[in-house]
Amino acid sequence: MEQQLRVLRIVHAAMLAAAVLYIFLPETVNRDRVEEPSQLTYLAVAVMAAFSVGAALMVRQTMVSRALETLQLHPEDGASLKRWFSGNMILFALCESVVVYGLALRFIGATWVQVAPFYAAGIILLLLFAPRKP
């Protein structure tokens, strides 16, 4: 279990670092200025990000929490350990996807004010869902 927790913490730290780098990436890359995306495009991406957040909450509740409960009673349960590890990895990917949606919007011309909620939500979720020892 210690090995899996160590791997999860490394992956979590790497995803947090990548999320912070995604904020600065569009500002440093030379690109032609394009017009802002349409409201429909922005809304569609916002809905996809909301679904990612919802999916992250469901994964947290169904996979991670249940596996944690089982691991507290039976720390040697291999199936629960795998479910806990897999659930955390999926959780991190879903949180990171919210930041990536903001990055994509920024590259297609959205303003900083429009993408800041995506960056903030993804990073806050990553911080809230940091891996913890069962």
Image: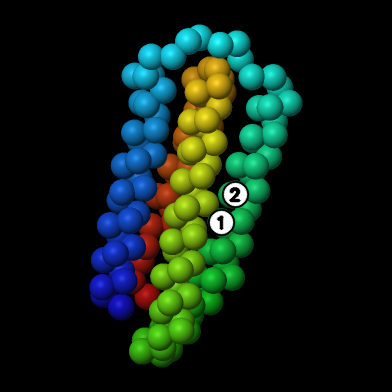
Q: Where is residue 17, by image quadrant?
A: top left
Tell me the amino acid under the disc marked 1.
Answer: Ala
Position of 29 with respect to 6 (left or right) is right
Q: Where is residue 48, by image quadrant?
A: top right
**Is 34 placed above or below 105 here?**
above
Q: Residue at (49%, 67%) from the top-left corner? A: 87
Q: Mark 1 highlights which residue?
A: 56
Q: Is residue 113 visible?
A: no
Tell me the amino acid under the disc marked 2.
Answer: Ser
* Quarter of the figure that contains the N terminus: bottom left
**Which residue is more in the foreground, 133 or 45?**
45
Residue 81's disc number:
none
Q: Residue at (40%, 50%) from the top-left corner? A: 127
Q: Circle 1 — which element?
A: helix
Q: Circle 2 — which element?
A: helix
Q: Mark 2 highlights which residue?
A: 52
Q: How is the image coloured?
A: rainbow
Q: Is residue 110 visible?
A: yes
Position of 47 with respect to 4 (left or right) is right
